[in-house]
Amino acid sequence: MPSSYILKNSPIDKNRIQKTCKKVIDEANEDRKLALETHRFFREMLDDNPQDATAKNLMVDCLKLAQTSKGSILKVVDLLIKLEAAQNRGAEGKTEMDSLYNQLDNLT
């Protein structure tokens, strides 16, 4: 019978969460940059043909995507701040520290 594997470190520790959050932020910044470049492209199309309704709709969609990516960054930063605050509260007065999974559930 195989033995059970026991983790030496938490599968979701603080460093791993920070690394994942940094990756999400970097990807959101790249998405925003691409959306704004595409917006400029459709704006140039509208300068040539102001009656192009498709270009107008796509230009608006690009702006929505750029705003959504900025909102994603703010959500990630907010979650990191709440996680840090929860860990600080736990270290100060709590006798029994919640698991990281429970802390993440309480943040959302």
Image: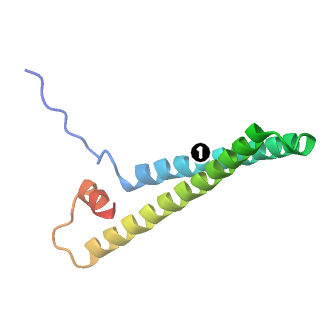
Quadrant position of the C terminus in the picture: bottom left
Quadrant of the rendered image containing residue 4: top left
Residue that extends furthest to the bottom in the rendered view of this protein: 93
Residue that extends furthest to the top in the rendered view of this protein: 1
Q: Which residue is mark 1?
A: 27
Residue drawn at x 59%, y 45% is: 27
Residue that extends furthest to the left in the rendered view of this protein: 1
Colouring of the image: rainbow
Q: Is residue 10 left or right of residue 41?
A: left
Quadrant of the rendered image containing residue 2: top left
Q: Relative to 1, is 90 above or below? A: below
Q: Could you say where residue 22 lies in the image, as x and y percent from the top left?
A: 53, 51
Q: Is residue 77 visible?
A: yes
Viewer-nearest residue: 77 or 15: 77
Number of numbered discs: 1
Quadrant position of the N terminus in the picture: top left
Residue drawn at x 12%, y 28% is: 3
Q: Could you say where residue 15 lies in the image, as x and y percent from the top left?
A: 43, 53
Residue that extends furthest to the front in the rendered view of this protein: 51
Q: Could you say where residue 10 lies in the image, as x and y percent from the top left?
A: 29, 48
Viewer-nearest residue: 66 or 49: 49
Q: Is residue 43 left or right of residue 27?
A: right
Residue drawn at x 16%, y 73% is: 95
Residue type at numbered disc 1: Glu
Residue drawn at x 69%, y 49% is: 60
Q: Could you say where residue 55 lies in the image, as x and y percent from the top left?
A: 77, 40
